[in-house]
Image (cartoon, rainbow, N blue to C red):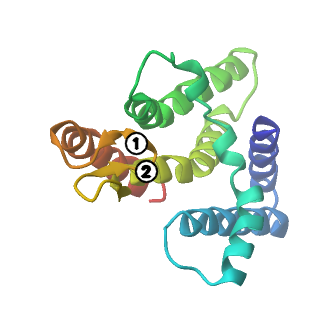
């Protein structure tokens, strides 16, 4: 489903770029941005009022389509007890994979004798990065979400086998997660 939605978004952006004032494309971008913001906001563990929690749960169903895009956990072996680190590596290189795959698609289009490939490449990369941006940010912030279980040691909420703020967690957080959040989390929107 997510592949179809991304294809529709890319097609909408490419076709609307040729029209002088396409309101549909603008509304689609605003709505997608709104859903992504709502999903990111709902991920924070605040004591939201009941109505807000209900609104978030409804909007999360629509806004998390981008979560279906990079389903990496099924690609990894079950032998790895701390799969959260492998998932973060894959999430960190996801934008590079997206750029390379888009490049191959539009290179093939160009070799087939079509014109306007560069503009289509830029539009495709922009749309797909815009869709995967919340996944990257959410996965990155999971490394800062710890829960105190035994009143002595906090553990990562996304993987209770990882103890927070010990040497392994600090290493991954400061050497990989923070750079991913800075480069892709701040870099994609700008």
Tell which of 144 and 149 is nearer to you: 149
Tell which of 87 and 17 is nearer to you: 87
- Say if 96 sits above or below 166 in the image: above
Secondary-structure class at tag 2: loop
Using the rendered view, name the quadrant where residue 160 is placed: top left
User: Which mark, by number, is residue 160?
Assistant: 1
- Say if 110 sits above or below 43 in the image: above
Tag 2 residue: 157
Q: Residue at x 48, y 46 (%)?
A: 136
Using the rendered view, name the quadrant where residue 61 is placed: bottom right
Using the rendered view, name the quadrant where residue 105 is placed: top right
Image spot of residue 79 (x, y percent): 45, 15
Image spot of residue 124 (x, y percent): 65, 40
Image spot of residue 152 (x, y percent): 22, 55
**Quarter the N terminus occupies:** top right
Q: Residue at x 66, y 46 (%)?
A: 66
Marks 1/2: CA distance? Answer: 6 Å
Secondary-structure class at tag 1: strand
């Amino acid at each position: 489903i997510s592949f179809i939605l991304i294809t529709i978004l890319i097609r909408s952006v490419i076709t609307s770029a040729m029209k002088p004032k396409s309101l549909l494309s603008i509304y689609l971008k605003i709505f997608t941005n709104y859903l992504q913001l709502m999903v990111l906001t709902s991920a924070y563990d605040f004591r939201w009022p009941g109505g807000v929690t209900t609104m978030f749960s409804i909007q999360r169903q629509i806004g998390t389509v981008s979560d279906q895009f990079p389903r990496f956990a099924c690609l990894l072996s079950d032998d790895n007890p701390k799969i959260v680190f492998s998932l973060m590596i894959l999430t960190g290189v996801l934008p590079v994979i997206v750029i390379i795959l888009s490049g191959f698609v539009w290179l093939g289009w160009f070799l087939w004798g079509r014109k306007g490939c560069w503009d289509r490449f830029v539009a495709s990369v922009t749309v797909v990065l815009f869709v995967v941006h919340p996944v990257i940010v959410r996965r990155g912030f999971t490394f800062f979400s710890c829960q105190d279980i035994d009143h002595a040691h906090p553990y990562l909420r996304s993987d209770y086998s990882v103890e927070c703020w010990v040497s392994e967690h600090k290493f991954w957080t400061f050497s990989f997660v923070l750079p991913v959040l800075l480069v892709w989390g701040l870099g994609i929107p700008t």
